[in-house]
Image (cartoon, rainbow, N blue to C red):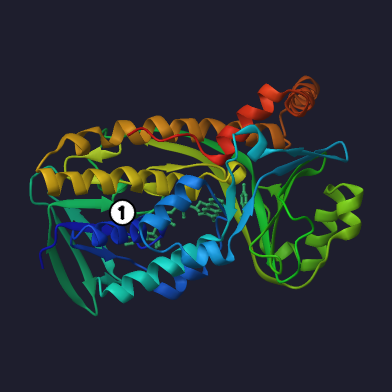
Amino acid sequence: MRVQVAIIGAGPSGLLLGQLLHRAGIEAVILERKSGEYVLGRIRAGVLEQGAVDLLDEAGVGARMHAEGLVHGGIHLCFDGERHRIDLAGLTGGKHVTVYGQTEVTRDLMDARAAAGAKTVYEAEDVSVHGFDTDSPVVRYRKDGKVHEITCDFIAGCDGFHGVTRESLPAGAVRNYERVYPFGWLGVLADVPPVSDELIYVNHPRGFALCSMRSMKRSRYYVQVPLDEKIESWPDDRFWTELKSRLDKQAAAAIVTGPSIEKSIAPLRSFVGEPMRFGRLLLAGDAAHIVPPTGAKGLNLAASDVRYLSRALIDHYRAGSMKEIDAYSGKCLRRVWKAVRFSWWMTSMMHRFPDTGEFGQKIQETELAYLVGSKAASTSLAENYVGLPFED
Ligand code: FAS
Ligand code: PHB
């Protein structure tokens, strides 16, 4: 089989890239090691920057997002039992975020790809990538016991943090930057109305908590837990009691609890692998970088990379140029590092670290007091949270 672009991974990065390339008349195949149902079953991100919303519109998959997504103009920070609203729209000249779950984004992209008749191979086993330092790279995979080979012009590594593409690079080709945090997030999804119509980020002596949502009937809550926590130790009652203990009095009294429909513990890390391009192999999304979810940047960075990558590939096929392909990694990384910084800063400010000490605790409390008391500081948070501008 021969295609112009072979995409590894059918998460948001791979599916969004495939959709944008298809609309530009560029033929791509997507290879995904899991089933479509498995991919949809992963509960992850919930907040879209305007840039991601615009890109989904450009991909022709924005209808349900606009019909069902919740447009938010602010978030709340809660500490010392008090809630403080950060007026995102007022501080950024009217910019908003849209609450629309990654599961729904993925479903919309899957439906669009199926409707277009574009090829996705699910449950593709033993995917391997070859010759990306030549003009005609090759991808191999096994399906139903048979080995298949795809020749292509480019390989897009959209296979996430545990994927095969970054692992296939020659030793020493990637510079890795990483910070692993000494805690995780225990997340619960429940069909109960959210406690607030905007997100609440909590810094409490017992640890961080986040009140989010997927709709006005489905809530998403998180509490910070030690890294060695086991999900089996967290029956629903224990989760709700712990969450309430971290909320302000009004929220604790108002929260509606109910049976969890999904419950999982996610580790937190910051990771960036540089560069993001190796000859004819280009990495996008979690395959190249990971951020702690505190800043709601993971999915949005994936969209940011795909925005640059789709434009570079379309430019190549339309103008016969490699200029944008050559510029891809630098453009992505300049925006990636700003989101990595913001996510690290939000995580450092909102979580309790075992080794903070009394001085560190006072600095964290002062950082929060300064943030909510200074228009300049709040504006800095707001402009990062709604999404920084793109380079063109
Ligand atoms: P993904 O990991 O989503 O997709 C990669 C795909 O490649 C997967 O479907 C995988 O099965 C496939 N794949 C892997 N190896 C392969 C191989 N060898 N062959 C073929 N296919 C292969 N972000 C937020 O903004 N907010 C959150 O709350 C949040 N929570 C998260 C919780 C968890 C547990 C994780 C892991 C991430 C979370 N994220 C969150 C970040 C997340 O949303 C990612 O940013 C987003 O999924 C990135 O999308 P992709 O780059 O497509 O990577
Ligand atoms: C979510 O709704 O899953 C969510 C929202 C904001 C975050 C992280 C996760 O910062």
Q: Quadrant of ligand 1?
A: bottom left
Estimate the x, y position of residue 280 in percent, counting from the top left: 17, 45
Quick check: 148 above or below 17? below
Estimate the x, y position of residue 378 in percent, counting from the top left: 68, 29
- Could you tell me if residue 103 is visible in this image? no
The residue beneath circle 1 is 164
- Could you tell me if residue 312 is visible in this image? yes
Q: Residue at x 21, y 52 (%)?
A: 155
Estimate the x, y position of residue 374 in percent, counting from the top left: 74, 23
The answer to whether the residue bearing label 1 lies less than 8 angstroms from the nearest atom of ligand 1 is yes
Q: Nearer the viewer, residue 88 or 171?
A: 88
Q: Residue 353 lies in what quarter of the image?
A: top right
Q: What amino acid type is highlighted by mark number 1?
A: Val
Quick check: 67 above or below 384? below
Q: Residue at x 42, y 48 (%)?
A: 302
Q: Nearer the viewer, residue 18 or 292?
A: 18
Q: Residue at x 43, y 35 (%)?
A: 336
Taking the image as shown, residue 236 lies to the left or right of residue 130, namely right
Q: Secondary structure at mark 1?
A: loop
